[in-house]
Image: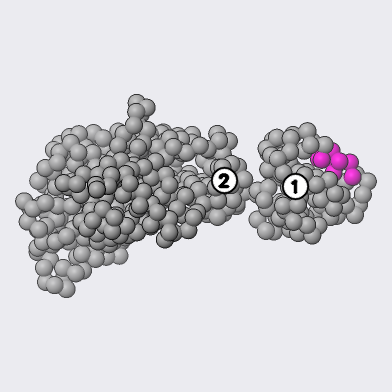
Amino acid sequence: MNVSPNTLWQRCLQIIRDNTTEQTYKTWFMPLAFESYNPSTKAVVLRVPSQYYYEYLEEHFVGLLGKVLNKVFGNGVKLLYKVATVSKQGTDVCMKSDNTPDTIKTQRQTKGNMPPTILDVAGQQLDPQLNPHQTFDNFIEGVSNRLSRTIGINISKNPNTTQFNPMFVFGPSGCGKTHLINAVGVKTKQLFPEKRVLYISARLFQVQYTNAVRQNTVNDFIAFYQTIDLLIVDDIQEWMTAKATQDTFFHIFDHLFRNGKRIILACDRPPVDLKGMNERLVTRFCCGLIAELQKPDRQLCVDILNDRIARDGLNIPEDVITYIAGTANGSVRDLEGVINSLLAYSVVDNCKIDMRLAERVIKRAVKIDDKPLTIDDILECVCKHYHVDTEAVNSKSRKRELVIPRQVSMYLAQKHIKMPAARIGKLVGGRDHSTVLHSCSQVEARLKTDKAFSEEIHSIETSFKLKA
């Protein structure tokens, strides 16, 4: 008797459930939807709710999925994902991953290494080493990047012109340089598939060159790079003390430039500040377009967060978005890290994303010279002073030994964080703003007549200031 593919998938789920924790099963496997099975190609298609789920499954559970699918559906099963995301037109867009369970590990191990054979001839297929997720569609435009983004799109559409060649992009870490230069490569490859496009980090280029010297294949190394139509090199400040690498790159650069090939370079400083870089290289860096990327302002950070939230189907309150944008140091990487952490915490702890969670994540995920004081900091110091538990203070209990720490926490939060009373009440046991106002007035009145209490408050303030 033939068994339906859907029944087979249910068997797969049961095996997975038996071999994982209940929390893991509910979080990562229950949301999977069986789409189809093609017996002729042995392709199993699973629908996942977001791009994040797809990436997490490939990173952590693809081995388990592969073994179970091969056991239930038979050897040689090919795993396909359909990731539903929301497009700008509001319709579902499906993206597929045709990695088989047996090959994903190998692909991940080779990801980011040098091209498969560095001595390839010009006619052979070349892996561009681009990140397909870093495109112009999700490179959000703002005042700090408008010029660079516009020029990058123009280069992608007209790779055969010599205008703005080379394009030298510079700016501080986290401003989006790597995303921009990747986007140029991805767009160029989409519009002109025949073009030989290659993205490489300066460090990897240097490693390849060193290996070529050891193997006595420098001429072949240079010949390979001279076949590239669009060469993208990231973090070239790495070469400032590497004289031999600079000399070799000069010959590659000169050949590509004279033959009308495109060169895009990214750096953390402008060419004039590349101390130790060969002067003839610096002059060539300056002969095209020098485009500065600044750290995104608060509005651009908000726009970037909203775009990411829409793509991942997240639900984050507006005040939380504003708070993250204002505390993430104007770094796109920090923004991404905070969103990833918020999502992970909310999934694992099965909690909603709110201001308290955001404050907790920011404190751990973002490196800030002067970290903002949070209600959790104040509560921790107040509870330590009064020898009570935070959970007890946040409870509905009206015991005096809990009421006083609760009122003091609200008073200090309003004094030092300048947060609306409604939000303070929400974070301290889910109380309303009138309770906060009453608590603050009670503490203020007592401070005027009770010297010992005033000294207590000063001691608590000193403790959380030192902690921060």
Which residue is labeled 2 in the image? 351
For this rendering, which residue is in front, 171 or 203?
A: 203
Residue drawn 67% across and 51% down? 376
Characterize the magenta stretch by its predominant secondary structure. Answer: helix
Specify the segment rendered in magenta.
Answer: 439-446
- The residue at which mark 1 appears reads as 395
Q: What residue is rendered at 32% in x and 44% in y?
A: 6
Q: For this view, does 305 lie left or right of residue 269?
A: right
Q: Residues within 10 Å of mark 1 (few under 14, many from 20)?
A: some
Report the amino acid beneath label 1.
Ser
Amino acid at the residue labelled 2: Cys
Quadrant, the C terminus: bottom right
Image check: 410 left or right of 182? right
Give the colour scheme shown: one colour
Magenta run includes residue 440: yes
Residue drawn at x 11%, y 51% as measured from the top left: 125
Check disc 1 and report its element: helix, strand or loop: loop
Near mark 2 (Cα within 10 A), the count class, few <14, some 14-19 or many ≥20, is: few
Q: Position of residue 463 (x, y in %)?
A: 74, 58
> Which numbered disc, 1 or 2, marks the residue that appears first in the sequence?
2
Circle 2 SS class: loop
